[in-house]
Image (spheres, helix red, strand yellow):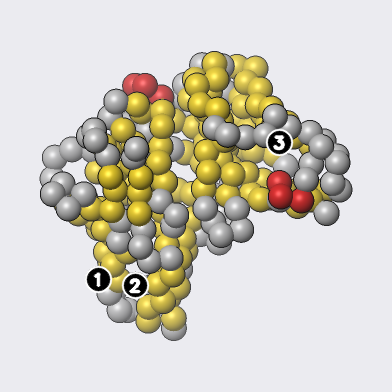
Amino acid sequence: DTAVSQTPKYLVTQMGNDKSIKCEQNLGHDTMYWYKQDSKKFLKIMFSYNNKELIINETVPNRFSPKSPDKAHLNLHINSLELGDSAVYFCASSLGTSGTGELFFGEGSRLTVL
Amino acid sequence: AQSVTQLDSQVPVFEEAPVELRCNYSSSVSVYLFWYVQYPNQGLQLLLKYLSGSTLVESINGFEAEFNKSQTSFHLRKPSVHISDTAEYFCAVTLKTSYDKVIFGPGTSLSVIP
């Protein structure tokens, strides 16, 4: 059973389109994250939710909107896609305030904007 | 502000040779320390962590890291690398005052040459 699963694994789309990536964790964790990994492998945190509440919102364009319907799910919707949005997006989870910050990652969703 | 530095962006090493990947951090508060590994086209997974106690920690596949508080370092070592160790390695810290915020280094790409 996959602990953190995200879909789809690959996304190829045109500029200007809207797309969503879904993430689910079955670890019972309180906190979930979205990270963006660029072509140089640099990891940048985008958002973090704790029990459905937004707790980290880094400098990310408004075109990116996270949604957490419950603490086991965190989705990412991207409007009006741009070439610079091409990257691998990772979902992760952690125990949150009762833990040490150890992260459990999904396999990633590779987004290519043409 | 807290930060994590990995001075070596790429480390090529011959099979069965020893390797050290360097990690330094700066923080005004106590931290937990982690090394994550990312194999090609996969998500990140925890390699080892330092929470407290013995400053030398080991992983199941032969890696070890030593926490040095005075030098604010957490270097990763392996006495004899294998082809399968080829991957991206990320050092990360979590502030003990804020378990939800994980700060990653820029990563070191380890290439093992047959």
Please indicate, yes or no, whether residue A28 appears anywhere in the rendered image.
no
Q: Is residue A25 left or right of residue B68?
A: right
Q: Name the kind of residue labelled 3 in the image.
A: Ile
In the rendered image, which residue does mark 3 sit on? A21
In the rendered image, which residue does mark 2 sit on? B81
Q: Position of residue B39 (x, y in %)?
A: 51, 59
Q: Residue at x 54, y 16 (%)?
A: A53
Of marks 1 and 3, the one in the foreground: 3
What is the chain letter for disc 2? B
Q: Is residue A66 left or right of residue A28?
A: right
- Give the Cα distance between marks 2 and 3: 36 Å
Please indicate, yes or no, whether residue B70 appears anywhere in the rendered image.
yes
What is the chain letter for disc 1? B
What is the chain letter for disc 3? A
Q: Secondary structure at mark 3?
A: strand
Q: Name the kind of residue labelled 2 in the image.
A: Val
Q: Residue at x 83, y 54 (%)?
A: A114
